[in-house]
Amino acid sequence: MNYQPLKYIYKASRDATANTLLLLHGTGGDENDLLPIAGELGANFNILSLRGNVSEGGMPRFFRRLGMGVFDEQDLVFRTNEMVAFIKELAIREKFDAGKLIALGYSNGANIAGSTLLLYPDFLAGAILYRPMQPFAIIGAGVKTSKRIPVFMSNGTTDPTIDPAATRIYVGTLKNAGFDVTHHSLPTGHNLTRQDLQLSADWYKKEFITLNPA
């Protein structure tokens, strides 16, 4: 396949056994956008932040779309495969454990993270999806994970770009595939809020930080 490398920022933790937080920006963002949000979750993890290889009117994206809310699903599959292949190669180069990867994506970035969950159900160790949409119009019933993979999702009840009914179907689809989904509908639009960050930080600590007994 004619895969291209992605531009990225990698920041290693001092802990060789640390998780790696995979940051995936929204439309028009880049690999710097979500770095401040990573800090909300703590510090004891590697950070891998990617820039999408697609340009829409000069705005970086992770995959093409045919219109507002209408994805080019063929390109989404290709770009998901491209991203996963790149991460696997990069894990060897940067010496992080590809089996301990937790995606954090916003909007377009959340959608390619969701595509990864569906196309590679056992690849990610967890995912934080801010303002996600169901990545594929039809999702095969055969999608199953063999692990208990936690997924955090938050959507805005006044977000004009996302249909709440479609979100409920998406949440149900992920649960039926075996993912452990925590979903929040917040009284806001498409932009992120302090509540998104606090809820996801609390979720991350609960799922991935093991406290040592006193």
Image (cartoon, helix red, strand yellow):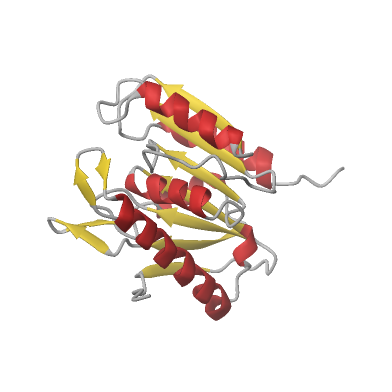
Say which quadrant the C terminus sits in: top right
Q: Which residue is situated farthest in the right direction here?
A: 214
- The picture places residue 103, in percent across and down from the top left corner, at 50, 52
- The picture places residue 70, in percent across and down from the top left corner, at 25, 41
The vertical placement of 186 against 18, above or below, is above
In this rendered view, identify the residue nearer to me: 95 or 213: 95
Residue at 12%, 55% (x, y): give it: 57
User: How many marks do you count on the picture?
Assistant: 0
Q: Is residue 195 visible?
A: no
Q: Quadrant of residue 157?
A: top left
Q: Which residue is situated farthest in the front direction here?
A: 141
- The picture places residue 127, in percent across and down from the top left corner, at 53, 46
Left or right of residue 19: residue 23: left
Residue at 39%, 68% (x, y): give it: 8
The vertical placement of 142 against 61, above or below, is above
Left or right of residue 63: residue 94: right
In this rendered view, identify the residue nearer to me: 110 or 179: 179
Q: Quadrant of residue 191?
A: top left
- The picture places residue 116, in percent across and down from the top left corner, at 48, 53
The vertical placement of 59 against 91, above or below, is above
Residue at 41%, 59% (x, y): give it: 80
Left or right of residue 46: residue 166: left
Q: Is residue 75 visible?
A: yes
